[in-house]
Amino acid sequence: MSQTEHRRARPEVSVIIPVYNEEAGLRALFERLYPALDALGADYEVIFINDGSRDKSAALLAEQFRTRPDTTRVILLNGNYGQHMAILAGFEQSRGDIVLTLDADLQNPPEEIGKLVNKMREGFDYVGTIRMQRRDSLWRRKASRAMNRLRERITRIKMTDQGCMLRAYSRHIIDTINRCGEINTFIPALAYTFSQNPVEIEVAHEERFAGESKYSLYSLIRLNFDLVTGFSVVPLQWLSFIGVILSMGSAGLFVLLLIRRFIIGAEVQGVFTLFAITFFLLGVIIFALGLLGEYIGRIYQQVRARPRYLVQTILEQRDGETVAGAPRQSVVQAVQPAQTIDQGPTR
Ligand code: UDP
Ligand code: MG
């Protein structure tokens, strides 16, 4: 029998959860997630993607797989590829007609999943979310709002709240995303560009249950760069526009200085003004190079056509086989690396 024949019929709902160093909160997540999904009255599968955690997360996920092998699958990536790449790995393994993404930190309450599923059943193919009373630090909220506005201008992607990852997508969107092979991407935006009938609903937002945000200021800035350069060439267009205006301005200034030199004579003090202008232009050039680099970097990554990530193990149950079969071997394989890490000091 081929591998696909082994697989069970497609569930209605797939829930994709990326996990990176979430050992402190995983148990609480399992306790709330599974009852919420059982209450849906739908066939479902939960796909956890361990994004190279350096704590006990992988072992905890393997344990959960053993508790609920019928509905749980665990993908262990061999390194840390970032939240969006982890979700992409989950998408490729997902089989559901409705695919939901969720954070592992319980900031998106699993009890809200029902709302999204109902909306999808109404016939929408993309359910975005807006966080009611967002529970994040003030600066994070302010920065998000500013970024959101800028992004909307540049990319024409309409999302009231780009940051909330509790979202639902239809099978056709997921299939299209799987075909994309994008490397640096922002999933909600990518999905939005493929959706035909999107809708947004309000969902509750909670404080992180345990641990701290895995996003540093740096990775947040990176993510927003991905979002802007990945979905628009407007910055490039702005750049050429700015370039034209600047060069016209400097040409005018040069003519002015030339005329002045012939009429009044050379001015010594003016040297400093020239310095200032030169430095300003240097700054502009460096900025321009950086921006060009963004695009060239993307081209470079895309043309290399490397595998986007490597899956170490997949814990899943196959039809007609008990857990004692091949999957158990996978469990053993999967648990080992996590245990080895447990013993060592945390990096
Ligand atoms: N995450 C991940 N890989 C990373 C960073 C984060 O898989 O490199 C996961 C993390 O475990 C969580 C989700 O992505 O499930 C969102 O991360 P986090 O809560 O730290 O982000 P925030 O809520 O601060 O935006
Ligand atoms: Mg979070």
Image: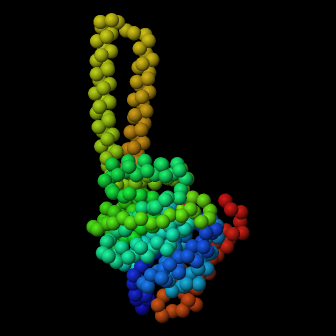
The image quarter in which residue 169 lies: bottom left
User: Which residue: 32% across, 66% down?
Assistant: 198
Using the rendered image of the protein, determine whether residue 229 is visible from the camera's viewpoint.
no
User: Which residue: 37% across, 54% down?
Assistant: 230
Q: Is residue 230 above or below residue 268?
A: below
Q: In the figure, is residue 198 to the left or right of 53?
A: left
Residue at the far bottom in the pictured view:
320
User: Which residue: 42% across, 53% down?
Assistant: 226
Using the rendered image of the protein, determine whether residue 199 is visible from the camera's viewpoint.
yes
Residue 298, image x, y percentages: 39, 53
Residue 179, image x, y percentages: 34, 68
**Which of 256 and 191 lies nearest the eye of the viewer?**
191
Image quarter in which the N terminus is found: bottom left
Display coloring: rainbow
Number of dots carrying numbers: 0
Residue at the far top in the pictured view:
264
Q: In the figure, is residue 1 to the left or right of 157?
A: right
The image quarter in which residue 23 lies: bottom right
Image quarter in which the C terminus is found: bottom right
**Which of 184 and 57 lies nearest the eye of the viewer?**
57
User: Which residue: 30% across, 29% down?
Assistant: 247
Q: In the figure, is residue 236 to the left or right of 161?
A: left
Q: Is residue 181 above or below residue 154?
A: below
**Which of 212 and 194 lies nearest the eye of the viewer?**
212
Residue at the far front in the pictured view:
133
Q: In the figure, is residue 320 to the left or right of 199?
A: right
Q: Is residue 241 above or below residue 1?
A: above
Residue 263, image x, y percentages: 29, 6
